[in-house]
Image (tube, rainbow, N blue to C red):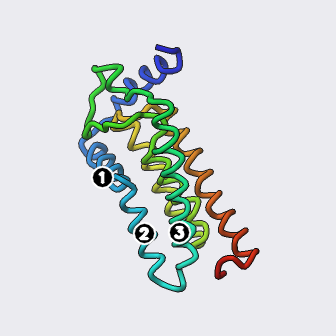
């Protein structure tokens, strides 16, 4: 094992002391909302349904697409990093066993992509989504299904996808390719 992975596993063992029944329930609930990006897809569909929020819905849908292509179709298969509990059976796993690769965290990436894309919906939506994205990342480490670097990478990649969607949408609007 490389020194970073060894350090992360030690850190994760130290974090196990923070586990509590309430924390376990909260982390599982937050993490469940990120399953398959369903809550974010539903939010994009809801935003698309109303003319006043359609722009934000389009930006969010584009961010979700960029995130899917980048994280799930490119990076996870490329890196194939094992999950923490497969490298250290002493970690107390408190959620279901994910079957895909650990790097980067897909839950965290989609949450941050959504948070950055929701800048198009206004400050309150962006801040609320950003708080949720941070909780998502923390829940993934708390549940012992991701290394901290998986979550940090997911946050960075997701943020880039969200900002890219916003940037692309603004460029398309300037070119009159889309309705502003």
Residue that carries the numbered disc 2 in the rendered image: 43
- Compare residues 29 and 53 and report the one nearer the observer: 53
- Compare residues 15 and 33 and report the one nearer the observer: 33
Q: Are marks 3 and 2 in contact (CB under 8 Å)?
A: no
**Number of callouts:** 3
Per the model, the C-alpha gap separating discs 3 and 2 is 11 Å
The quadrant where residue 141 appears? top left
Q: Nearer the viewer, mark 2 or mark 1?
A: 2
The quadrant where residue 167 appears? bottom right
Residue that carries the numbered disc 1 in the rendered image: 29
Residue at 46 percent of width and 69 percent of height = 44
Query: In the displayed structure, would residue 139 be above or below residue 33?
Result: above
Point out residue 92 in the picture as x, y percentages from the top left corner. 27, 28
Residue that carries the numbered disc 3 in the rendered image: 125
Point out residue 51 in the picture as x, y percentages from the top left corner. 52, 86
Residue at 45 percent of width and 41 percent of height = 105
Which label's residue is closer to the chain start, 2 or 1? 1
Classify 10 Å Cα crowding around label 1: few (below 14), some (14-19), many (20 and above).
few
Question: Left or right of 76: which side holds 95?
Answer: left
Per the model, the C-alpha gap separating discs 3 and 1 is 20 Å
């Amino acid at each position: 094992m490389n020194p970073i992975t060894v350090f992360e596993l030690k850190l994760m063992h130290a974090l196990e002391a923070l586990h509590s029944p309430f924390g376990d329930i909260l982390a599982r609930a937050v993490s469940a909302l990120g399953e398959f990006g369903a809550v974010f897809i539903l939010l994009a569909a809801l935003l698309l349904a109303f003319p006043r929020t359609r722009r934000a819905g389009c930006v969010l849908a584009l961010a979700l697409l960029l995130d899917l292509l980048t994280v799930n179709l490119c990076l996870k298969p490329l890196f194939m990093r094992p999950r923490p509990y497969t490298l250290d059976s002493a970690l107390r796993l408190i959620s279901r066993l994910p079957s895909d690769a650990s790097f980067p965290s897909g839950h965290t990436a989609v949450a941050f992509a959504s948070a950055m894309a929701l800048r198009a919906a206004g400050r309150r939506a962006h801040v609320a989504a950003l708080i949720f994205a941070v909780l998502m990342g923390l829940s993934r480490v708390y549940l012992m299904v991701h290394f901290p670097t998986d979550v940090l990478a997911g946050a960075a990649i997701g943020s880039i996808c969200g900002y890219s969607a916003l940037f692309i949408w603004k460029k398309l609007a300037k070119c009159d390719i889309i309705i502003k």
